[in-house]
Amino acid sequence: MLHIRTATPEDATVLALLGRVTYAESHGHFIQCKTHLLNYGDEAFAVSKIKSELNDPTILYHIVTYDDFPVGYSKIVMHASREEINSENICRLERIYILDDFISKKIGIQLLNKIIEESTALGFEKIWLTVYIKNQRAIRFYEKNDFKTVGQMDYYVDGVPYENFVLAKNIQKQ
């Protein structure tokens, strides 16, 4: 059975591990140097960093379990403006990852729907994210769910830039 809940500081170690594994699964083949991937994992998914973010009121993590096994997570940054998006009530979906073995169970769409539902309830009008320009699977997923490309930006992995699309979606209640 699938369960999505708000993460707590007690989930930091599980989130750090999920982050490292899911990022390597989804992006590892795109990263030019495996040392860069390892260094990025050490920095971005350090347990201490995740704990700090879980205590930040502007950051919201969700953790997904399937039959009580942690299989994915998300990270939302509230009030994260972006120059291409004309709105003050905006949030950023910084991370949404599901372990490869569980992607076929359509968990990603359920997690995305939960994120949009909660973001709307919090009063946000738009949500934005970035996706690597060569990550066609993710691009198709977001486009299928009404995200539109609004710009581009570089995302750095261990100091190396990777070109990303900026996508956004209007989530305001009509």
Image (cartoon, rainbow, N blue to C red):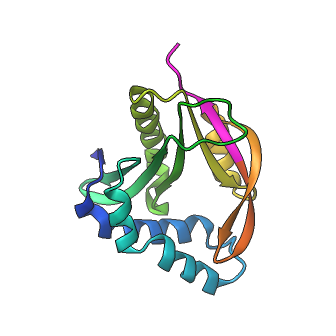
Relative to residue 110, is residue 87 drawn left or right?
A: right
Is 92 above or below relative to 26? above
Query: Which residue of the protein is positioned furthest toward the front in this rendering?
Result: 88
Q: Which residues are magenta?
A: 166-174
Is 145 above or below relative to 156? above
143 or 116: which is nearer to us? 116
Relative to residue 84, is residue 92 drawn left or right?
A: left
Point out residue 84 in the picture as x, y percentages from the top left corner.
73, 38
Point out residue 166 in the picture as x, y percentages from the top left corner.
70, 46
- Residue appearing at x 45%, y 34% in the figure: 113
Is 94 above or below relative to 14? above
- Residue appearing at x 46%, y 47% in the figure: 76
Residue 132 occupies which quadrant of the picture?
Answer: bottom right
Residue 119 occupies which quadrant of the picture?
Answer: top left
Query: Which residue of the protein is positioned furthest toward the top in this rendering?
Result: 174
Magenta stretch: includes residue 112: no
Relative to residue 1, is residue 77 drawn left or right?
A: right
Point out residue 156 in the picture as x, y percentages from the top left corner.
67, 68
Point out residue 13 in the picture as x, y percentages from the top left corner.
31, 70
- Residue appearing at x 45%, y 66% in the figure: 19
99 or 105: which is nearer to us? 99
- Residue appearing at x 49%, y 17% in the figure: 173
